[in-house]
Amino acid sequence: MKRTQKNFHRNILICVYGFFFVCILGGITVWASYQERSFSQKGWLNCDLAKRYLYIDDFEEKYNVAGMRRYEIEELLGSPTWRKTEPDTEKIIYYEYRIQDNLLAGWKVYQVRFQDDIVIDTTIIVEDW
């Protein structure tokens, strides 16, 4: 009887320690997957569209985006998800890159606005439905 009770307590202790280990491991995994990432062209282009928001802050810190030329943006970020041109012309007004998917609100997009093919500003907006 005493041995059975001792085994029972040992099994409970193993379960409790196992539970805490799994919780800690899961927490570290979630933290690591949502941690801001260092921008690289390869990382950006190979990343899931819904996770690109993790690169934006570092991208804007590394590059003085305002003042860059349109071809430089295309070299770094690739082809945009959407581009807006002036009516009846090919003059680019802005590019939009999808960066985060939100089931309720829709896609967040990184909008890069141009004037004469030079970046004038950037914003993060929610994509219109």
Image (cartoon, grey):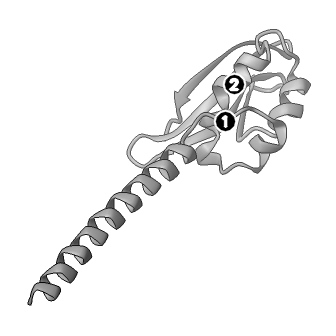
Q: Nearer the viewer, residue 85 or 52?
A: 52
Residue 81: x %, y % from top left: 71, 41
Instruction: State the residue in front, 128 or 11.
Output: 11
Q: Specify the farthest residue to the left.
A: 1
Q: Is label 1 in a helix, a strand or a loop? A: loop
Task: Determine the secondary structure under disc 2.
Answer: helix
Q: Above or below — where is 97 with respect to 122?
A: below
The picture quadrant where one finds residue 66 is top right
Q: Give me the disc on residue 37.
A: 1
Where is the N terminus found, in terms of image quarters?
A: bottom left
Looking at the image, is 27 positioned above or below residue 41? below
Q: Along the horizontal axis of the image, is 126 left or right of 85?
A: left
Tell me the distance, in whole angstroms, between the alpha carbons under discs 2 and 1: 7 Å
The residue under the point 34% across, 58% down is 20
Q: Residue at left 64%, top 40%?
A: 52
Mark sitting earlier along the chain (2/1): 1
**Rendered position, 21 above or below 76:** below
State which quadrant residue 60 falls in.
top right
Q: Is residue 29 left or right of residue 44?
A: left
Where in the figure is residue 44, as x and y percent of width and height? 75, 41
Query: Between residues 68 and 7, which one lies in front from this camera angle?
Result: 7
Tags 2 and 1 in contact by the CB under 8 Å rule? Answer: yes
Amino acid type for the residue under numbered disc 2: Asp
Q: Residue furthest front?
A: 2
How far across and down, in percent of the image, does residue 40 sit? Answer: 80, 35
Q: Amino acid at mark 1?
A: Arg
Can you tell which mark lies on residue 58? 2
